[in-house]
Image (cartoon, rainbow, N blue to C red):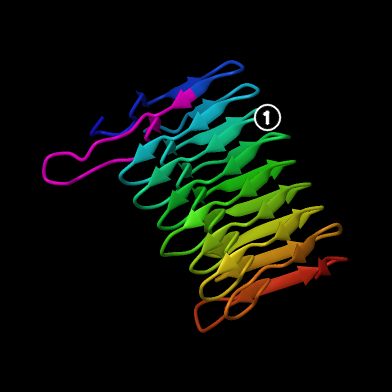
Amino acid sequence: ATKGGGAIFSKKGVAFGDNAVLSGNSTALAIGGGGYGGGAIFLEGKGAVRFGKNAVIANNESYHYGGAIYSLGSVSMGEGAIVRGNTTSYMGGAIAVTGALSLGTGSVVESNQAQAGGAVYSTGQVSATGTTFRKNVATSNYGGGIYSAGGSIVLVDSRMEENKAAGGGAVLLAGGGTASVTDTTFEGNSATTNGGAVYVQNGAVDLGSGTRLQGNQAVKGGAIYALGGKDASAKLTFADAVFG
């Protein structure tokens, strides 16, 4: 599909029951080189893409936003989702979303790749409970696991491990957004420049109890790099977080 949505294009919404599988779909470059996103699904309207339990979203590819899903609305996934091996040439290796994204308990988001936002690019809220982000890569930009631009991130009882990026190996928070992290482990993430685990470019991060950062690497800020300036501010709050 040159318009976007290698399998499904919708202006209103898409709903799946349990055990849905979206695999091996892709968008194509239009004549003249233009391309849209959503290797499997492009939701052009403000509705929702909804999955039941145990969805498998794997090996989809796009040439713009969202290797698997590009949604101008929201995306929600039930328990046990597997989001693996999706790629895009730009932002959001697996998912690019402007509304809310929620991931259910036991979900695994791994081995996705993009220039920025190796797994997820979001301008809305990303909520993950009991979710693992593993081995996602932002090849030449920020946010190996999640790139949040002006939105918010809520991580509860989750893991961010072995994700890689130029900056913010696991997470980039920019655009004045917020992040709330509880009972979550950042381990083995890396950045070739700054912020092995988290890069706060402009926003506020609250690392709550049960949060652990260990074995992350970067040139500056092996665990966290916070950048403020004339037109930006960065605020970090720690409550019983453990480093090392």
Residue 175 at x, y = what percent?
51, 64
Residue 139 at x, y = what percent?
43, 60
Residue 160 at x, y = what percent?
67, 53
Q: Is residue 239 above or below residue 109?
A: below
Identify the residue under disc 1. Answer: 80
Please tell me which residue lies in front, 108 or 15.
Answer: 108
Q: Residue at x 59, y 75 (%)?
A: 218
Q: Residue at x 65, y 75 (%)?
A: 222
Quadrant the C terminus occupies: bottom right
- Most prominent secondary structure in the magenta stretch? loop
Residue 93 at x, y = what percent?
45, 46
Q: Does the stretch in magenta take in 36?
A: yes
- View extreme (left): residue: 32
Q: Does the stretch in magenta take in 13?
A: no
Q: Residue at x 16, y 46 (%)?
A: 33
Q: Is residue 117 above or below residue 50?
A: below
Provide the residue span drawn in magenta. Answer: 22-43
Q: Amino acid at mark 1?
A: Gly
Please tell me which residue lies in front, 58 or 76.
Answer: 58
Instruction: Provide the secondary structure element on which disc 1 rests.
Output: loop
